[in-house]
Image: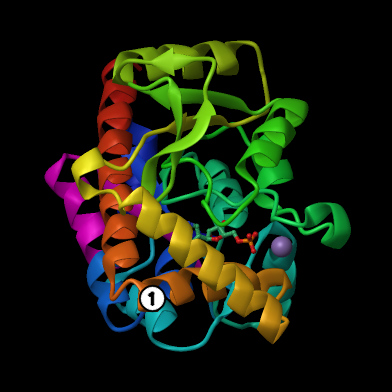
Amino acid sequence: MRVAADVAAAVSTGVPVVALESTLFAHGLPRPGNLEVARELEALLRESGVVPATVGIVGGNPVVGLSDDEIELLGSKEVAKASTRDIPLASALGVHAATTVAATSWLAYRAGVRIFATGGLGGVHRGASETFDESPDLPALARTPVTVVCAGVKSILDVGATLERFETLGVSIAGYRTDRFPGFLVADSGFPVTWVLDGPDEVVAAMRLRDELSIRAALVVASPVPSDQQLDPATHDRLLAEALDAAAMQGVSGQAITPFLLDHMQRGSAGASLEANIAAVRNNVLVAAAIARADAATQ
Ligand code: PSU
Ligand code: MN
């Protein structure tokens, strides 16, 4: 594994660092705008006084803190989508791969980066009682003590079942300044959350306690897309129903289902779902930056 020099220096001197994943821009966003977004997220962190650590696999090498050229490489051509189990295989074969929430949190954690921002987490897919399709993000977060700032789980999933699985797996879930579990492209998934954290200091307090007690699971900080930037909820529901129909008709399943549904919704909304997706990620990056600064300030 390679940790970029600025990331390693920041980790060892207590400068705030936030990890970002590469699947989000390599598989979740359309080219070529995806690269602009990947760069913008890094710039947002730098402007907030935080060192960005975008994670991916380059030529078989897991990297925490991709260079700009490496981001361009992963975002410009077809690369594999790597969850934790794929890391050793991609490495053995020397291939490039984008890392999901599961793989990114593990690599970030190993590099000493404890805060991670993304869009929506993976979870239990609709129809999982038949297909068993449940994202490896779920068990990965159960064994990786990082703090993940996200806009909930992807709304293409069975959100209720995913929340039940998080409970079973012992993953802490908190609404960030809301008692509604966010719905990824929309502010409210329709499900409540039990715990509300009202700012960075409360998040850091929860992280400290988790670490002090050696609880090995992640803390999910669920922060909604700002409501003026959300996808209109009725439009969201229509687009999603259409995308699910198309996936069923074309027999799309497994790892391909998430990128397929996101892409279908982006096309069907002339980019409105894409705008909401990017707005959610941007907002999560800013929340993660505030948490990382609060964490560094109280080290
Ligand atoms: N959130 C987004 N876009 C994405 C993803 C999440 O806004 O592309 C990716 C993440 O990398 C997540 C993955 O880990 O989708 C989950 O895929 P699967 O359901 O195949 O495990
Ligand atoms: Mn799956």
Front residue of this view, candidates 95 and 226: 226
Quadrant that contains the C terminus: top left
Q: Quadrant of ligand 1?
A: bottom right
- Work out whether 61 lies above or below 153: below
Q: Is residue 247 visible?
A: yes
39 sits left or right of 93 in the view: left
49 sits left or right of 114 in the view: left
| Residue plotted at (73% across, 35% down) | 165
- Work out whether 280 lies above or below 198: below
| Residue plotted at (50% across, 34% down) | 190
Q: Which residue is mark 1?
A: 268
In the image, the residue with mark 1 has its CB under 8 Å from the nearest atom of ligand 1: no
8 sits left or right of 86 in the view: left
Q: Is residue 57 visible?
A: no
| Residue plotted at (65% across, 33% down) | 163
Front residue of this view, candidates 53 and 278: 278
Residue 183 at x, y = what percent?
45, 43
What's drawn in magenta, residue-wise?
Answer: 38-56
Residue 39 at x, y = what percent?
24, 65
Circle count: 1
Residue 70, picture quadrant: bottom left
Q: Residue furthest bottom?
A: 77
Quadrant that contains the N terminus: bottom right
Helix, strand or loop at label 1? It is helix
